[in-house]
Amino acid sequence: MQRDEQIFELIEAEKERQLHGIELIASENFVSNQVMEAAGSVLTNKYAEGYPGKRYYGGCEVVDEVEQIAIDRAKALFGAVYVNVQPHSGSQANTAVYHACLNPGDKILGFDLSHGGHLTHGSPVNFSGKLYNPVFYGVEQETGVLNYDKIQEIATKEQPKLIIAGASAYSRDIDFERFRVIADSVGAILMADISHPAGLIAKGILNDPLPHCHIVTTTTHKTLRGPRGGMIMMGKDFENPFGIKLKNGNLRKMSSLLDSAVFPGNQGGPLEHIIAAKAIAFGEALTDEFLQYQLQVKKNAAAMAKALVAKDYNIISGGTDNHCMLIDLRNKNLSGKDAEQALVKADITVNKNMVPFDDKSPFVTSGIRLGVSAVTTRGLNDTDMVAIVELVDEVINNFEDDAALEAVKAKVNAMMQDKPLFV
Ligand code: PLP
């Protein structure tokens, strides 16, 4: 068969873009060569509906071993007793949890999308807001941080069946212990969605949700630096509180409901090539090298936030505890959309983002979100973060001047030229 040059040329073009640019999208990272190799392996040819040892297809002996290793490594990494590595994405992981715990119309309490939450936490444009009945908590206007007393008040008033603790654009650590007190006070299931800070949590740098939350979901491709995918975990299994019974009359365990919700509830065959890549990424994350990487991520984010504040950038909550930060650009007189477009012209990739109490639409926005996981993987340190802020500031101050943006682009390309893309 003829090689499909059309697509391979585009893949090469994307590789060049990644190589030459400064990647500040908070949800992105660069995987290792071995993670990439597994993701492009022959395991993509295999159907394996079911779970290790209980498949609906023959020939699953090898992928059974792969999937079991992924599960065991994830358990060791997070201190979990239950892990399901099959969700194709973070959204699929959340879908499965809701499917296991809720009926259509049930009330869920999540972090408002415009304050930092995720679409799957009840947004009206997402299945979670259409199928269930969402209510929201948000950050305080003055401080940009969560007020747990107010979350308690909302929970008491609304009596949700499920509470979601977690965010896509929140730079502060989350008090999962307090969330559990709130959930218990109203008899709600508490789910943490640690998609963003999972890598930092795995290495003990941020609060651990496993001891406090009934269920924890995550993506595997952000700070965790694995292939694109999702995962569901529990620190402790328990009998489901919904009265769902086995044939023998015993209550079904939550682990069994979650497994059924993933397959056959919401997915068919698992992506065993991606599960192999997840296993490799978890193995990498178990090393001391990965701890050093996450410590550098935290250090880099703090250095970037400090340099931005020194240049009068308004970071929501004033700084960061993790890998990311959300900047309100209203004092700089340009929209998030203008900033994103100008930065892309200079080979700096960010995403426009709503800020709390935004007066612009999600297509325009007043802010941008920055994260340092990807540039840290490429070997940049805290001094480099200060240099990046200089470049970002030059773009923001000259966002309509194409010659100035070209000049910044040359500096960006020079900075990144000797930095390896893969670990
Ligand atoms: N949950 C959170 C908090 C996220 O930030 C994201 C992705 O950005 C997701 C879920 C969804 O992940 P995916 O894009 O893999 O569906």
Image: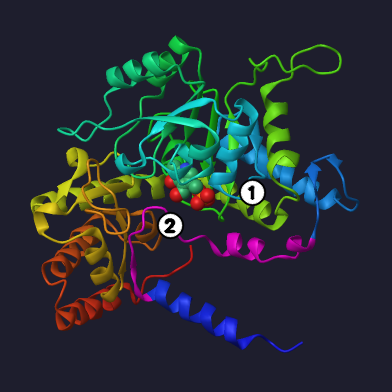
Q: Is mark 1 within 8 Å of ligand 1?
A: no
Q: Can residue 25 be found in the magenta stretch?
A: yes
Q: Is residue 15 above or below residue 168?
A: below
Relative to 185, is 65 on the left or the right? Answer: right
Residue 264 or 284: which is nearer the viewer? 264
Residue range (magenta)? 20-45
* Crowd tier of the residue under label 1, counting other residues whose Cα lies within 10 Å: few below 14, some 14–19, many 20 or above: many
Percent across and percent down for residue 99 are 63, 33
Element assignment for label 2: loop
Residue 190 or 122: which is nearer the viewer? 122
**At 38% across and 54% down in the image, what residue appears?**
373
Q: Is residue 307 above or below residue 218?
A: below
**At 88% across and 50% down in the image, what residue appears?**
57
Q: Can residue 53 be found in the magenta stretch?
A: no
Relative to 276, is 76 on the left or the right? Answer: left
From this viewpoint, is residue 199 visible?
no
The residue to which callout 1 is attached is: 279
Percent across and percent down for residue 358 are 22, 46
- Count of numbered marks: 2
* Crowd tier of the residue under label 2, counting other residues whose Cα lies within 10 Å: few below 14, some 14–19, many 20 or above: many
Mark carried by residue 28: 2
Q: Is residue 403 above or below residue 160?
A: below
